[in-house]
Amino acid sequence: GENVEQHPSTLSVQEGDSAVIKCTYSDSASNYFPWYKQELGKRPQLIIDIRSNVGEKKDQRIAVTLNKTAKHFSLHITETQPEDSAVYFCAATNQAGTALIFGKGTTLSVSS
Amino acid sequence: GAGVSQTPSNKVTEKGKYVELRCDPISGHTALYWYRQSLGQGPEFLIYFQGTGAADDSGLPNDRFFAVRPEGSVSTLKIQRTERGDSAVYLCASSPRDSAYNEQFFGPGTRLTVL
């Protein structure tokens, strides 16, 4: 079935460093790839997304890259801050375009 | 404006009981999704509504789970004969456009605990 793999499961960085989270997906029909941030006990919130007709997208300190041939996409956070600490989920649309398939999440810890 | 809301925020029930979980989407959003999130996992798709109809219910784990959206707004997820394995956070999300190729706005979830 459709699957999204996410690595690493945990990531610890020092404030100011960069953080990279990688995901691979199985369904070549997927064409929308959002990233959600979930703070402890809170709802997931979209931080950035990318569609299959674009290879890279940037929003201030956050960027996402997509390689459709290799079926992988990555989240890049530069100049990390303690408030970036959270669980980050990648997702990809299923073949029918009716749902998001989520990765298992990456717990990012930014220490000051 | 108001975001997606879910009630109750917490529900504790006994094995074998029936529960209903409610989702109020953002006004005007036609697409509504239910997901289930277990501890340490990402949200797992359950069902997707376009308006009043379930366009994709392939994620419902078995026939104990059922969801409705009779007027195309509020949705209720119903679980019969609850089992301990049903314990999880049930998340609802809505979107202004049909199909999953658009941002989904999540509610705070209902934490279900089956004793």
Image (cartoon, coloured by chain):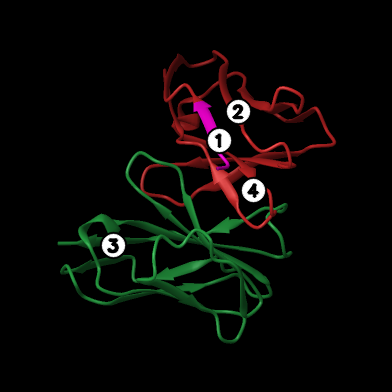
Which marked residue is nearer to the observer: mark 3 or mark 4?
4
| Chain A tint as drawn | red
- On what subunit does the disc labeled 2 rest? A
Which marked residue is nearer to the observer: mark 2 or mark 3?
2
Residues at marks 3 and 1, CA–CA distance in whole angstroms:
26 Å
Q: Pick whichever of labels 4 and 1 is earlier in the sequence.
A: 1
| Chain B tint as drawn | green
Instruction: Give how far across and how far down residue B9 sits, in percent.
Output: 34, 65
Image mark for residue A67: none
- On what subunit does the disc labeled 4 rest? A
Image mark for residue B112: 3
Q: Which residues are magenta?
A: A1-6
Which quadrant does the C terminus of chain B fall into?
bottom left
> What residue does disc 2 label?
A24
Residues at marks 1 and 2, CA–CA distance in whole angstroms:
6 Å
At label 4, which amino acid type do we have? Answer: Asn
Residues at marks 3 and 4, CA–CA distance in whole angstroms:
26 Å
Circles 2, 3 touching at the beta carbon (< 8 Å): no
Instruction: Give how far across and how far down residue A88 sits, in percent.
Output: 50, 35
